[in-house]
Image (cartoon, rainbow, N blue to C red):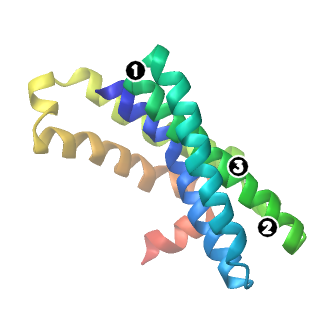
Amino acid sequence: MEPLLAAYGFALLGNAASRVLTTASYAVGDTKTPARYAIYRVVASAGVATGLMQVLDVMGVVLGSVIAAWVEALALGLQMRRRLGGLGLSTVPMTRILALSVGCMAPAVLLRALLPETFVATSVGASCVLGAAGAAFVVLTPKLGLPHSRRILRG
């Protein structure tokens, strides 16, 4: 089951970006483009999933969903960039965000590997693993100089 969840994890950013870009499209008065791209997403997901599930079984369906999420996000992003003249991503410190992602994931993965499987399967064990990621986030965001996170952490 874990490989399926890991594969779905790759869709999270694509799904989140799609939702933000859909809302941005609505905000500038364009309701047709997100609806049209959502249809493309369903068609792409079904097509890719049908092809991949012949070879990869359920993982093929998951990968179809993942690929479709990213296709929709990229298409919406390109559309919004053309419409707005940019998305402001040049101001996002991507290397620091990537470092934060790895820095939060590493302790959680390490702790998960060290704890007994029977403990990790409990809500307390899962909370410990998630807590390790959260603690790393609290420690690393100020050290990486991510300004928005500093404001969040101050309350």
* Pointer 3 local density, CA inside 10 Å: few below 14, some 14–19, many at least 20: few
Give the left or right position of residue 103, taking residue 95 as reference. left
- What's the residue type where badge 2 is placed? Met
Q: Alpha carbon of mark 2 to alpha carbon of mark 1: how far?
A: 35 Å
Considering depth in this image, is 135 or 101 the residue closer to the camera?
101
Q: Alpha carbon of mark 3 to alpha carbon of mark 2: how far?
A: 20 Å
Task: Point out the frontmost of discs 2 and 1.
Answer: 1
Residue on which disc 2 sits: 80
Residue on which disc 3 sits: 94
Q: Looking at the image, which residue is at 34% across and 35% down?
A: 108
Residue on which disc 1 sits: 57
Q: Do tag 3 and tag 2 residues touch (Cβ < 8 Å)?
A: no
Q: Alpha carbon of mark 1 to alpha carbon of mark 3: how far?
A: 35 Å
134 to 106, vertically: above or below: below
Q: Looking at the image, which residue is at 58% across and 32% down?
A: 48
x and y, in percent, of residue 123 in the image: 12, 44
**Is residue 99 in view?**
no
Of callouts 1 and 3, the N-terminal one:
1
